[in-house]
Image (spheres, rainbow, N blue to C red):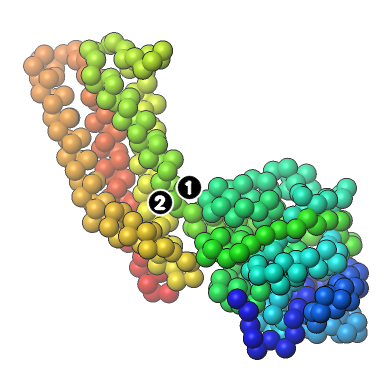
Amino acid sequence: MTNEKAALDVTILMPCLNEAESLPYSIRSAQSALEELKKHGLSGEILIADNGSTDSSREIAAGMGCRVVTCTNRGYGNAVICGVKAANGVYIIMGDADGSYDFLEAVPMALKLKEGYDLCVGSRFKGKIMPGAMPWKNRYIGNPLLTGLLNLFFGSGLSDAHCGLRAFTKGAFDYMSLQSPGMEFASEMVVKAAILKLRRTEVPVTLSPDKRNSPSHLKPWEDGKRHVKFLLIYGPLRLFFIPSLAMILFGCFIFTGLLLVPPHSFFRFGQLRFGDHWLILAGGIFSIGFQGCILGMIALLYRVLNESVPTSAFQRKLLWKVFSMQNIIFCGTAIILLALGIFGYIIREWRMVNFGELSKIREMVIATTLMVVGLQAFFGVLLAAVVAGELKQD
Protein backbone atom coordinates (compact mmCIF):
# COMPACT_ATOMS: atom_id res chain seq x y z
CA MET A 1 0.00 0.00 0.00
CA THR A 2 1.74 3.14 -1.18
CA ASN A 3 0.87 6.70 -2.03
CA GLU A 4 2.02 7.31 -5.59
CA LYS A 5 1.47 11.07 -5.33
CA ALA A 6 4.03 11.45 -2.54
CA ALA A 7 7.01 13.62 -3.49
CA LEU A 8 9.56 11.87 -1.26
CA ASP A 9 10.37 8.35 -0.12
CA VAL A 10 10.58 8.88 3.65
CA THR A 11 9.17 11.36 6.16
CA ILE A 12 10.66 11.28 9.66
CA LEU A 13 7.80 12.53 11.80
CA MET A 14 8.19 13.79 15.37
CA PRO A 15 5.19 14.85 17.48
CA CYS A 16 6.39 17.74 19.62
CA LEU A 17 5.13 19.50 22.73
CA ASN A 18 7.65 21.74 24.51
CA GLU A 19 10.70 19.67 23.58
CA ALA A 20 13.22 22.53 23.24
CA GLU A 21 15.79 20.76 25.42
CA SER A 22 15.76 17.44 23.59
CA LEU A 23 14.65 18.44 20.09
CA PRO A 24 18.12 19.39 18.76
CA TYR A 25 19.45 15.92 19.64
CA SER A 26 16.48 14.21 17.98
CA ILE A 27 16.77 16.33 14.84
CA ARG A 28 20.49 15.65 14.51
CA SER A 29 19.73 11.94 14.93
CA ALA A 30 17.06 12.16 12.23
CA GLN A 31 19.45 14.03 9.92
CA SER A 32 21.98 11.22 10.33
CA ALA A 33 19.23 8.76 9.48
CA LEU A 34 18.39 10.66 6.29
CA GLU A 35 22.04 10.52 5.25
CA GLU A 36 22.04 6.78 5.79
CA LEU A 37 18.79 6.40 3.86
CA LYS A 38 20.36 8.20 0.89
CA LYS A 39 22.85 5.35 0.66
CA HIS A 40 19.89 3.07 0.00
CA GLY A 41 18.47 5.39 -2.65
CA LEU A 42 15.75 6.85 -0.42
CA SER A 43 15.05 10.59 -0.24
CA GLY A 44 13.47 12.13 2.82
CA GLU A 45 12.41 15.00 5.03
CA ILE A 46 12.04 15.78 8.72
CA LEU A 47 8.60 16.93 9.80
CA ILE A 48 7.81 18.32 13.26
CA ALA A 49 4.14 18.08 14.25
CA ASP A 50 3.93 20.77 16.92
CA ASN A 51 1.09 20.21 19.36
CA GLY A 52 0.94 23.66 20.93
CA SER A 53 4.47 24.24 22.24
CA THR A 54 4.96 27.40 24.30
CA ASP A 55 8.76 27.19 24.36
CA SER A 56 11.17 27.63 21.45
CA SER A 57 10.59 24.18 19.90
CA ARG A 58 9.13 25.55 16.68
CA GLU A 59 11.96 28.03 16.17
CA ILE A 60 14.59 25.39 16.89
CA ALA A 61 13.04 22.99 14.39
CA ALA A 62 12.75 25.61 11.65
CA GLY A 63 16.28 26.83 12.32
CA MET A 64 17.65 23.31 11.84
CA GLY A 65 15.95 22.96 8.46
CA CYS A 66 12.89 20.97 9.45
CA ARG A 67 9.38 21.51 8.17
CA VAL A 68 6.92 22.39 10.96
CA VAL A 69 3.15 21.92 10.98
CA THR A 70 0.81 23.07 13.73
CA CYS A 71 -1.63 20.56 15.21
CA THR A 72 -4.38 22.41 17.07
CA ASN A 73 -6.03 19.34 18.63
CA ARG A 74 -4.02 18.31 21.68
CA GLY A 75 -2.93 14.72 22.21
CA TYR A 76 -0.25 12.36 20.99
CA GLY A 77 -2.54 10.59 18.54
CA ASN A 78 -3.90 13.86 17.18
CA ALA A 79 -0.37 15.15 16.59
CA VAL A 80 0.63 12.02 14.67
CA ILE A 81 -2.53 12.05 12.54
CA CYS A 82 -2.01 15.72 11.72
CA GLY A 83 1.64 15.09 10.87
CA VAL A 84 0.94 12.12 8.60
CA LYS A 85 -1.62 14.13 6.66
CA ALA A 86 1.05 16.77 6.00
CA ALA A 87 3.84 14.27 5.22
CA ASN A 88 5.30 14.08 1.70
CA GLY A 89 6.84 10.64 2.14
CA VAL A 90 5.61 7.25 0.97
CA TYR A 91 7.11 5.77 4.13
CA ILE A 92 6.61 7.39 7.54
CA ILE A 93 9.11 6.94 10.37
CA MET A 94 7.49 8.06 13.61
CA GLY A 95 9.54 8.75 16.72
CA ASP A 96 9.47 10.75 19.91
CA ALA A 97 11.18 14.14 20.08
CA ASP A 98 12.47 13.63 23.62
CA GLY A 99 15.82 12.16 22.59
CA SER A 100 15.04 8.66 23.86
CA TYR A 101 15.46 7.04 20.43
CA ASP A 102 18.25 7.09 17.87
CA PHE A 103 16.63 7.51 14.46
CA LEU A 104 19.53 5.68 12.86
CA GLU A 105 17.91 2.53 14.26
CA ALA A 106 14.83 3.33 12.19
CA VAL A 107 16.72 2.93 8.91
CA PRO A 108 16.17 -0.87 8.94
CA MET A 109 12.47 -0.14 9.51
CA ALA A 110 12.26 1.88 6.30
CA LEU A 111 14.03 -0.93 4.48
CA LYS A 112 11.45 -3.39 5.85
CA LEU A 113 8.73 -1.22 4.33
CA LYS A 114 10.63 -1.21 1.06
CA GLU A 115 10.55 -5.02 1.20
CA GLY A 116 6.75 -4.91 1.28
CA TYR A 117 5.80 -4.67 4.96
CA ASP A 118 3.06 -2.23 5.96
CA LEU A 119 4.14 -1.68 9.57
CA CYS A 120 7.43 -2.11 11.40
CA VAL A 121 7.56 -1.52 15.15
CA GLY A 122 10.67 -1.17 17.28
CA SER A 123 11.21 -3.66 20.08
CA ARG A 124 12.92 -2.32 23.17
CA PHE A 125 12.70 -5.73 24.82
CA LYS A 126 14.58 -7.40 21.96
CA GLY A 127 16.97 -4.46 21.85
CA LYS A 128 18.24 -2.51 24.86
CA ILE A 129 16.69 -0.51 27.65
CA MET A 130 19.36 1.71 29.16
CA PRO A 131 19.43 2.32 32.94
CA GLY A 132 16.88 4.94 33.95
CA ALA A 133 15.16 4.92 30.55
CA MET A 134 11.93 3.18 31.62
CA PRO A 135 10.24 3.11 35.05
CA TRP A 136 10.12 -0.36 36.55
CA LYS A 137 6.29 -0.45 36.56
CA ASN A 138 6.26 0.24 32.83
CA ARG A 139 9.06 -2.22 32.07
CA TYR A 140 7.90 -5.17 34.16
CA ILE A 141 4.13 -4.61 34.50
CA GLY A 142 2.52 -2.10 32.15
CA ASN A 143 4.16 -2.81 28.80
CA PRO A 144 4.35 -6.63 29.12
CA LEU A 145 0.75 -6.81 30.39
CA LEU A 146 -0.74 -4.58 27.68
CA THR A 147 1.34 -6.20 24.93
CA GLY A 148 0.32 -9.64 26.22
CA LEU A 149 -3.36 -8.71 26.20
CA LEU A 150 -3.04 -7.27 22.71
CA ASN A 151 -1.38 -10.44 21.44
CA LEU A 152 -3.93 -12.64 23.20
CA PHE A 153 -6.92 -10.82 21.74
CA PHE A 154 -5.60 -9.90 18.30
CA GLY A 155 -2.47 -11.98 17.59
CA SER A 156 -0.27 -9.06 16.56
CA GLY A 157 2.89 -11.14 16.96
CA LEU A 158 4.85 -8.17 18.35
CA SER A 159 6.96 -8.19 21.50
CA ASP A 160 6.67 -4.46 22.23
CA ALA A 161 3.39 -3.03 20.98
CA HIS A 162 3.93 0.39 22.57
CA CYS A 163 7.36 1.35 21.31
CA GLY A 164 7.48 5.01 20.24
CA LEU A 165 9.76 4.33 17.28
CA ARG A 166 7.96 2.72 14.35
CA ALA A 167 7.51 2.98 10.59
CA PHE A 168 4.55 2.46 8.30
CA THR A 169 3.46 3.22 4.77
CA LYS A 170 1.20 6.18 4.24
CA GLY A 171 -1.22 3.98 2.34
CA ALA A 172 -1.50 1.57 5.26
CA PHE A 173 -2.01 4.48 7.64
CA ASP A 174 -4.91 5.77 5.54
CA TYR A 175 -6.37 2.26 5.32
CA MET A 176 -6.30 1.84 9.11
CA SER A 177 -8.24 5.09 9.62
CA LEU A 178 -6.75 5.70 13.06
CA GLN A 179 -8.69 8.02 15.38
CA SER A 180 -7.44 7.71 18.97
CA PRO A 181 -6.42 11.16 20.23
CA GLY A 182 -4.11 10.14 23.05
CA MET A 183 -1.40 7.62 23.92
CA GLU A 184 -3.74 4.70 23.17
CA PHE A 185 -3.06 5.59 19.53
CA ALA A 186 -0.09 3.20 19.70
CA SER A 187 -2.39 0.29 20.55
CA GLU A 188 -4.95 1.26 17.94
CA MET A 189 -2.32 1.17 15.20
CA VAL A 190 -1.14 -2.33 16.11
CA VAL A 191 -4.67 -3.67 16.69
CA LYS A 192 -6.04 -2.41 13.40
CA ALA A 193 -2.96 -3.62 11.55
CA ALA A 194 -3.66 -7.10 12.97
CA ILE A 195 -7.42 -6.98 12.28
CA LEU A 196 -6.89 -5.77 8.72
CA LYS A 197 -4.19 -8.41 8.12
CA LEU A 198 -1.51 -5.86 7.23
CA ARG A 199 2.05 -7.17 6.92
CA ARG A 200 3.89 -6.27 10.12
CA THR A 201 7.29 -6.96 11.63
CA GLU A 202 9.66 -5.56 14.25
CA VAL A 203 13.34 -4.71 14.70
CA PRO A 204 15.38 -4.29 17.91
CA VAL A 205 15.89 -0.71 19.11
CA THR A 206 17.52 1.00 22.06
CA LEU A 207 15.63 3.13 24.57
CA SER A 208 17.75 5.76 26.32
CA PRO A 209 16.83 8.21 29.08
CA ASP A 210 15.16 11.23 27.50
CA LYS A 211 17.07 14.48 27.23
CA ARG A 212 14.48 16.68 28.91
CA ASN A 213 14.55 18.17 32.38
CA SER A 214 10.75 18.43 32.42
CA PRO A 215 8.39 15.56 33.37
CA SER A 216 7.37 13.04 30.72
CA HIS A 217 4.09 13.56 28.86
CA LEU A 218 3.27 9.92 29.58
CA LYS A 219 0.79 9.34 32.43
CA PRO A 220 1.14 5.61 33.15
CA TRP A 221 -2.11 4.97 35.02
CA GLU A 222 -4.37 7.21 32.95
CA ASP A 223 -2.82 6.10 29.66
CA GLY A 224 -2.94 2.48 30.81
CA LYS A 225 -6.66 2.74 31.56
CA ARG A 226 -7.31 4.19 28.12
CA HIS A 227 -5.33 1.34 26.56
CA VAL A 228 -7.39 -1.23 28.46
CA LYS A 229 -10.63 0.54 27.49
CA PHE A 230 -9.52 0.41 23.88
CA LEU A 231 -8.83 -3.33 24.12
CA LEU A 232 -12.26 -3.91 25.70
CA ILE A 233 -13.96 -2.31 22.72
CA TYR A 234 -11.87 -4.04 20.08
CA GLY A 235 -11.67 -7.52 21.63
CA PRO A 236 -15.13 -8.48 22.98
CA LEU A 237 -15.08 -12.07 21.72
CA ARG A 238 -12.01 -13.30 23.56
CA LEU A 239 -12.31 -10.93 26.49
CA PHE A 240 -15.99 -11.47 27.34
CA PHE A 241 -17.56 -14.45 25.63
CA ILE A 242 -14.97 -17.19 25.97
CA PRO A 243 -14.31 -16.83 29.75
CA SER A 244 -18.01 -16.09 30.38
CA LEU A 245 -19.16 -19.24 28.61
CA ALA A 246 -16.58 -21.23 30.57
CA MET A 247 -18.03 -19.86 33.83
CA ILE A 248 -21.58 -20.66 32.77
CA LEU A 249 -20.59 -24.22 31.88
CA PHE A 250 -18.87 -24.65 35.25
CA GLY A 251 -22.01 -23.47 37.06
CA CYS A 252 -24.21 -25.82 35.03
CA PHE A 253 -21.82 -28.69 35.76
CA ILE A 254 -22.11 -28.18 39.54
CA PHE A 255 -25.89 -27.62 39.43
CA THR A 256 -26.54 -30.72 37.32
CA GLY A 257 -24.24 -32.94 39.34
CA LEU A 258 -25.86 -32.03 42.66
CA LEU A 259 -29.40 -32.36 41.32
CA LEU A 260 -28.66 -35.94 40.24
CA VAL A 261 -27.68 -37.15 43.71
CA PRO A 262 -29.75 -37.39 46.93
CA PRO A 263 -29.89 -34.36 49.29
CA HIS A 264 -26.86 -33.80 51.57
CA SER A 265 -24.73 -36.19 49.52
CA PHE A 266 -21.76 -35.61 47.20
CA PHE A 267 -21.27 -36.27 43.54
CA ARG A 268 -17.93 -37.46 42.28
CA PHE A 269 -15.87 -36.31 39.32
CA GLY A 270 -12.78 -38.44 39.21
CA GLN A 271 -11.04 -37.99 42.56
CA LEU A 272 -13.03 -34.83 43.32
CA ARG A 273 -16.15 -34.69 45.48
CA PHE A 274 -18.63 -31.81 45.24
CA GLY A 275 -21.22 -31.09 47.92
CA ASP A 276 -23.81 -28.43 48.69
CA HIS A 277 -21.23 -25.80 49.66
CA TRP A 278 -20.16 -25.69 46.01
CA LEU A 279 -23.61 -24.33 45.13
CA ILE A 280 -22.65 -20.89 46.41
CA LEU A 281 -19.57 -20.72 44.20
CA ALA A 282 -21.45 -22.18 41.23
CA GLY A 283 -24.27 -19.66 41.56
CA GLY A 284 -21.87 -16.73 41.78
CA ILE A 285 -19.75 -17.87 38.85
CA PHE A 286 -22.83 -18.62 36.74
CA SER A 287 -24.14 -15.09 37.40
CA ILE A 288 -20.78 -13.49 36.57
CA GLY A 289 -20.53 -15.53 33.38
CA PHE A 290 -24.02 -14.53 32.25
CA GLN A 291 -23.30 -10.87 33.03
CA GLY A 292 -20.07 -11.17 31.06
CA CYS A 293 -22.02 -12.35 28.02
CA ILE A 294 -24.36 -9.37 28.34
CA LEU A 295 -21.42 -6.97 28.57
CA GLY A 296 -19.82 -8.72 25.61
CA MET A 297 -23.01 -8.23 23.62
CA ILE A 298 -22.94 -4.50 24.41
CA ALA A 299 -19.25 -4.21 23.53
CA LEU A 300 -19.87 -6.07 20.27
CA LEU A 301 -22.81 -3.76 19.54
CA TYR A 302 -20.59 -0.73 20.08
CA ARG A 303 -17.95 -2.18 17.80
CA VAL A 304 -20.35 -3.06 14.98
CA LEU A 305 -22.15 0.30 15.05
CA ASN A 306 -18.96 2.32 15.38
CA GLU A 307 -17.88 2.92 11.79
CA SER A 308 -14.27 3.63 12.82
CA VAL A 309 -13.86 0.08 14.14
CA PRO A 310 -13.32 -2.68 11.55
CA THR A 311 -15.62 -5.68 12.00
CA SER A 312 -15.92 -9.03 10.28
CA ALA A 313 -19.00 -10.67 8.78
CA PHE A 314 -18.81 -13.28 11.56
CA GLN A 315 -18.99 -10.59 14.28
CA ARG A 316 -21.96 -8.88 12.63
CA LYS A 317 -23.76 -12.21 12.23
CA LEU A 318 -22.99 -13.09 15.85
CA LEU A 319 -24.55 -9.83 17.02
CA TRP A 320 -27.64 -9.71 14.81
CA LYS A 321 -28.41 -13.45 14.70
CA VAL A 322 -27.23 -14.79 18.07
CA PHE A 323 -26.87 -11.93 20.55
CA SER A 324 -29.67 -9.80 19.17
CA MET A 325 -31.81 -7.87 21.65
CA GLN A 326 -34.84 -9.99 20.73
CA ASN A 327 -32.94 -13.19 21.51
CA ILE A 328 -31.69 -11.77 24.81
CA ILE A 329 -35.23 -10.77 25.81
CA PHE A 330 -36.54 -14.24 24.89
CA CYS A 331 -33.71 -15.89 26.82
CA GLY A 332 -34.26 -13.66 29.86
CA THR A 333 -37.99 -14.36 29.84
CA ALA A 334 -37.46 -18.13 29.57
CA ILE A 335 -34.96 -18.09 32.44
CA ILE A 336 -37.30 -16.08 34.70
CA LEU A 337 -40.20 -18.43 33.94
CA LEU A 338 -37.97 -21.41 34.77
CA ALA A 339 -36.96 -19.74 38.04
CA LEU A 340 -40.61 -19.06 38.90
CA GLY A 341 -41.43 -22.70 38.12
CA ILE A 342 -38.74 -23.90 40.53
CA PHE A 343 -39.93 -21.46 43.19
CA GLY A 344 -43.45 -22.80 42.68
CA TYR A 345 -42.19 -26.35 43.15
CA ILE A 346 -40.38 -25.35 46.36
CA ILE A 347 -43.48 -23.63 47.77
CA ARG A 348 -45.60 -26.67 46.93
CA GLU A 349 -43.15 -28.93 48.75
CA TRP A 350 -43.14 -26.52 51.67
CA ARG A 351 -46.92 -26.59 51.89
CA MET A 352 -46.83 -30.40 51.95
CA VAL A 353 -44.88 -30.26 55.22
CA ASN A 354 -47.24 -27.59 56.63
CA PHE A 355 -44.61 -24.86 56.05
CA GLY A 356 -42.23 -26.58 58.37
CA GLU A 357 -38.65 -27.74 57.89
CA LEU A 358 -37.68 -28.12 54.21
CA SER A 359 -34.56 -29.49 52.55
CA LYS A 360 -34.56 -27.85 49.13
CA ILE A 361 -31.41 -25.76 49.38
CA ARG A 362 -30.16 -26.87 45.97
CA GLU A 363 -33.36 -25.94 44.18
CA MET A 364 -33.53 -22.60 46.04
CA VAL A 365 -29.96 -21.60 45.08
CA ILE A 366 -30.54 -22.56 41.46
CA ALA A 367 -33.87 -20.72 41.26
CA THR A 368 -32.39 -17.58 42.84
CA THR A 369 -29.45 -17.67 40.45
CA LEU A 370 -31.75 -18.01 37.45
CA MET A 371 -33.96 -15.15 38.63
CA VAL A 372 -30.90 -12.89 39.01
CA VAL A 373 -29.50 -13.64 35.55
CA GLY A 374 -32.95 -13.34 33.95
CA LEU A 375 -33.30 -9.82 35.32
CA GLN A 376 -29.72 -9.07 34.24
CA ALA A 377 -30.75 -9.90 30.68
CA PHE A 378 -33.47 -7.24 30.70
CA PHE A 379 -31.20 -4.60 32.25
CA GLY A 380 -28.56 -5.48 29.66
CA VAL A 381 -31.01 -4.97 26.81
CA LEU A 382 -31.98 -1.56 28.20
CA LEU A 383 -28.31 -0.53 28.36
CA ALA A 384 -27.71 -1.86 24.83
CA ALA A 385 -30.64 0.22 23.57
CA VAL A 386 -29.12 3.33 25.13
CA VAL A 387 -25.73 2.60 23.56
CA ALA A 388 -27.27 1.95 20.14
CA GLY A 389 -29.32 5.15 20.36
CA GLU A 390 -26.28 7.25 21.25
CA LEU A 391 -24.20 5.80 18.43
CA LYS A 392 -26.96 6.32 15.86
CA GLN A 393 -27.28 9.97 16.95
CA ASP A 394 -23.54 10.46 16.45
In the depicted structure, whether residue 232 falls above or below residue 251: below
Is residue 359 or residue 211 the one in the foreground? Answer: 211
Residue at numbered disc 1: 239
In the depicted structure, whether residue 175 falls above or below residue 62: above
Residue 289, percent from left and from top: 38, 39
Residue 111, percent from left and from top: 75, 69
Q: Amino acid at mark 1?
A: Leu
Secondary structure state at the residue bearing disc 1 = helix
Horizontally, residue 211 falls left or right of residue 297, namely: right
State the separation of the CA atoms marked 2 and 1: 8 Å
Extreme-top residue of the structure:
265
- Tell me where residue 172 sits by quadrant: bottom right
In the depicted structure, whether residue 7 falls above or below residue 175: below
Decide if residue 77 is in sight here.
no
Is residue 7 or residue 252 the one in the foreground? Answer: 7
Q: Which numbered disc, 2 or 1, marks the residue that appears first in the sequence? A: 1
Q: Amino acid at mark 2?
A: Gly
Determine the residue positioned at 73% across, 48% down. 138
Callout 2–callout 1 Cβ contact below 8 Å: yes
Is residue 21 or residue 120 the one in the foreground? Answer: 120
Residue at numbered disc 2: 296
In the depicted structure, whether residue 277 falls above or below residue 189: above
Image quadrant holding the C terminus, namely bottom left
